[in-house]
Image (cartoon, rainbow, N blue to C red):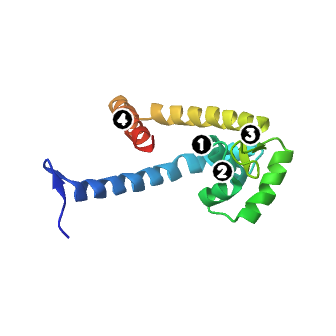
Amino acid sequence: MKKKKENGINFKSNAQMMMEMINIMSLFTRKTVLSWMPELMESLGVNEERFMVLFELNLEPGVSLKSLSQSLMVSSPSLSIMINSMVDQGLVSRTQDPEDRRKVLLCLGPQGKKCLAKSEEYLSNQFEQYLLSLPLNDREELIKFSSNLMNVVKKILA
């Protein structure tokens, strides 16, 4: 297969580098956030599955059950049972789609918003401790790279 070049840029090697970065970031997530999850879940009083529902609804509020089940890679019937109890607990709320009154949209409920605010505070503290453990030059480089990466990804997603 011929490598595509434009203005001297080798897109095949850049694409491979992006894939490697995604893999490294997945590993970084497992070594940090996922290792902190048991303590976080216990402090919040929710299990990992419910937390992931809240996390997804925070990323994409006003989503349908079907779309949420696809994002979480679980069946709609299983998710529906969980959502019902989360609605009863005030973690999730249901609203009618203004464009199609037959559709129900899911959003964070008042308790879900509180739960995510607590998790954000906890994770921020954990990352602050993690960053403080790095040498200053590595910390500065990581923060600069993270900021640049976030800006580019936001442009892609817009």
The three-letter code of the residue at mark 3 reads Gly
- Residue sitting at the far bottom: 1
The three-letter code of the residue at mark 4 reads Asn
Q: Residue at x 68, y 44 (%)?
A: 99
Q: Which numbered dot is residue 52?
A: 2
Q: CA distance from mark 2 to mark 1?
A: 10 Å
Residue under label 1, please give it. 59
The secondary element bearing badge 3 is classed as helix
> Which of the marked residues, 1 or 4, is nearer the chain's N terminus?
1
CB under 8 Å between discs 4 and 3: no
Q: Quadrant of the N terminus?
A: bottom left
The three-letter code of the residue at mark 2 reads Met
Find residue 89 and report its horizontal and vertical position in percent: 84, 44
- Would you call the spot at circle 1 few (<14 residues within 10 Å), some (14-19), or many (20 or more)? few
Q: Residue at x 52, y 33 (%)?
A: 129
Q: CA distance from mark 1 to mark 3?
A: 13 Å
Q: Residue at x 82, y 46 (%)?
A: 87
Q: CA distance from mark 4 to mark 3?
A: 30 Å
> Which of the marked residues, 2 or 3, is nearer the chain's N terminus?
2
Q: CA distance from mark 4 to mark 2?
A: 26 Å
Find residue 120 and report its horizontal and vertical position in percent: 62, 35
Instruction: Report the mark closest to the observer, 2 or 1.
Output: 1
* Figure check: 43 above or below 72: above
Find residue 118 and report its horizontal and vertical position in percent: 69, 34
Q: CA distance from mark 1 to mark 4?
A: 20 Å
The three-letter code of the residue at mark 1 reads Leu
> Which of the marked residues, 2 or 1, is nearer the chain's N terminus?
2
Residue under label 4, please give it. 148
Residue under label 3, please give it. 112
The secondary element bearing badge 2 is classed as helix
Q: CA distance from mark 2 to mark 3?
A: 11 Å
> Which of the marked residues, 4 or 2, is nearer the chain's N terminus?
2
